[in-house]
């Protein structure tokens, strides 16, 4: 018998849960230095949390949580949520990934926010978020049952390069659409999806992994919103009748061409672009058949090869690792004392916002010469997942997918400690990702090498 696997997968027990994480309007949503308002005035689409739990044999389950949130201002806040989940669920740290979709129209995630932001409401929200995540994951664990996850890959043209040489200042880069791309290289348009089927071939969950900054909505927007992932999920969930987890890829230099607007319809349009691209792949998985079996030849006007779909035998191996890596910090990185001295001379505006972010990054990595970091690597049958607590450039996923084509790559997972631009870009210190990051050149390549080694040892 001749059999060919079209859509590889994983056979295991899966559980899924969805919950609301939309904050009250008294929680600050000021995420842009150019914004003049501290609080949202309404809700475009609810913010959600979604958990997918994967269990194989008697081992502890793997828990993947996707949250419609922006980014952690401080390492301590991300660690506090992650460790609370590990403790409440008796999970090893390598078995939990808390991933943020990176909307820029969500609540301020900072346990020490400015006085203007109503700190008490933010603190209360962080506590509510923790409790909701614990409850949600417990529901997903209670939902565990035999299922099959199947992978597919394709592309979507939503993302473009966003490192743009300033036309009025040749010594400066702007963060915005670059028609020429980076080094004439096409933006990474890779789109990976997965679909979880139960024993009756009903869809239980879907995953969509794509690299594109959710920066459609910016300082003119006054609504809480997941940005384009919201409309994307509406498309996918309407067609599959199951929760969809959006997983933000290695999008350090990628964003929509049209962005920084207050128009909610633009965010929804971007979501539909990604949603329909995702459905074009997910529909190929809809029968739940991953293999094709050759049934022989039939003579007709042409000699025909007859193939029929089959479930086949999906892989069953699941493994998790979370190795550490010491990343060198930039030699000219200002110390905590230097940043605090500058902050004392600023009271508001974009300069103040930049200094606050710089302070939080410096506090996250410490005042030394290296920072001990961690990455997460999961083997999922014929597929895999790598998650990093950075805003890595797409070179990370491009390189890893050369050997592992069904690899989900996640930025902003279990923290967010700064950008990881490619080594070749460090010659231009005006590039936002280069002057924002605390890490020395070569850090992206070191993380990529560690991820590759870990994947190959699963």
Image (spheres, grey):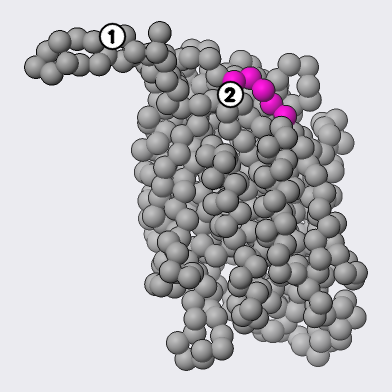
Badge 1 local density, few (<14 within 10 Å), some, or many (20+)?
A: few
Q: Nearer the viewer, residue 335 or 22?
A: 335
Residue 276, percent from left and from top = 37, 43
- Secondary element under disc 2, as helix, strand or loop, is strand
Q: Are marks 2 and 1 in contact (CB under 8 Å)?
A: no
The residue that appears at 58% across and 32% down in the rendered structure is: 383
The residue that appears at 81% across and 87% down in the rendered structure is: 342
The residue that appears at 63% across and 17% down in the rendered structure is: 145
Is residue 54 rendered to the left or right of residue 295?
Answer: right
Residue 10: which numbered mark, if any?
A: 2
Is residue 274 rendered to the left or right of residue 341?
Answer: left
Residue indicated by mark 1: 296
Sequence-earlier tag: 2 or 1: 2
Q: CA distance from mark 2 to mark 1?
A: 28 Å
Query: For the view shown, which residue lies furthest in the left direction?
Result: 301
Instruction: Tell me where the magenta segment starts and ends, as one range.
Output: 315-319
């Amino acid at each position: 018998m001749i059999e060919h696997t079209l859509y590889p997968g994983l056979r295991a027990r899966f559980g899924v849960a969805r919950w609301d994480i939309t904050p009250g309007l008294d929680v600050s949503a000021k995420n842009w230095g150019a914004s003049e308002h501290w609080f949202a005035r309404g809700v475009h689409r609810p913010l959600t949390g979604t958990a997918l739990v994967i269990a194989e044999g008697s081992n502890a389950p793997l828990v993947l949580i996707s949250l419609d949130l922006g980014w952690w201002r401080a390492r301590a806040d991300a660690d506090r949520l992650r460790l609370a989940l590990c403790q409440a669920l008796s999970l090893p740290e390598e078995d939990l990934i808390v991933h943020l979709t990176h909307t820029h129209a969500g609540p301020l995630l900072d346990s020490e926010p400015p006085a203007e932001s109503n700190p008490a409401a933010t603190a209360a929200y962080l506590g509510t978020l923790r409790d909701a995540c614990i409850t949600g994951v417990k529901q997903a664990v209670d939902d565990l049952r035999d299922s099959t996850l199947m992978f597919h890959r394709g592309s979507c043209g939503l993302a473009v390069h966003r490192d743009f040489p300033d036309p009025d200042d040749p010594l400066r880069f702007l963060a915005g659409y670059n028609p020429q791309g980076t080094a004439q290289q096409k933006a990474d348009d890779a789109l990976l999806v997965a679909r979880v089927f139960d024993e009756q071939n009903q869809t239980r969950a879907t995953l969509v992994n794509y690299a594109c900054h959710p920066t459609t909505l910016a300082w003119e927007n006054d609504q809480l919103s997941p940005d384009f992932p919201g409309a994307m999920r509406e498309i996918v969930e309407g067609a599959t009748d199951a929760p969809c987890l959006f997983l933000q890829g290695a999008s350090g230099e990628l964003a929509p061409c049209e962005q920084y607007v207050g128009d909610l319809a633009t965010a929804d349009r971007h979501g539909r672009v990604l949603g329909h691209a995702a459905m074009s792949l997910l529909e190929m998985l809809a029968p739940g058949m991953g293999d094709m079996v050759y049934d022989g030849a039939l003579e007709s006007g042409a000699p025909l090869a007859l193939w029929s779909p089959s479930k086949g035998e999906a892989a069953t191996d699941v493994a998790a690792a979370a190795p550490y890596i010491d990343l060198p910090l930039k030699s000219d990185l200002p110390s905590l004392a230097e940043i605090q001295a500058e902050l004392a001379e600023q009271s508001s505006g974009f300069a103040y916002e930049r200094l606050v972010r710089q302070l939080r990054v410096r506090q996250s990595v410490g005042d030394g010469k290296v920072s001990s970091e961690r990455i997460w690597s999961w083997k999922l049958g014929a597929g895999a997942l790598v998650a990093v607590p950075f805003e890595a450039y797409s070179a990370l996923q491009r390189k890893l997918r050369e050997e592992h084509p069904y690899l989900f790559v996640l930025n902003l997972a279990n923290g967010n400690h700064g950008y990881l631009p490619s080594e070749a870009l460090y010659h231009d210190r005006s590039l936002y990702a280069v002057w924002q990051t605390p890490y020395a050149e070569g850090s992206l390549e070191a993380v990529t090498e560690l991820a590759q080694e870990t994947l190959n040892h699963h």
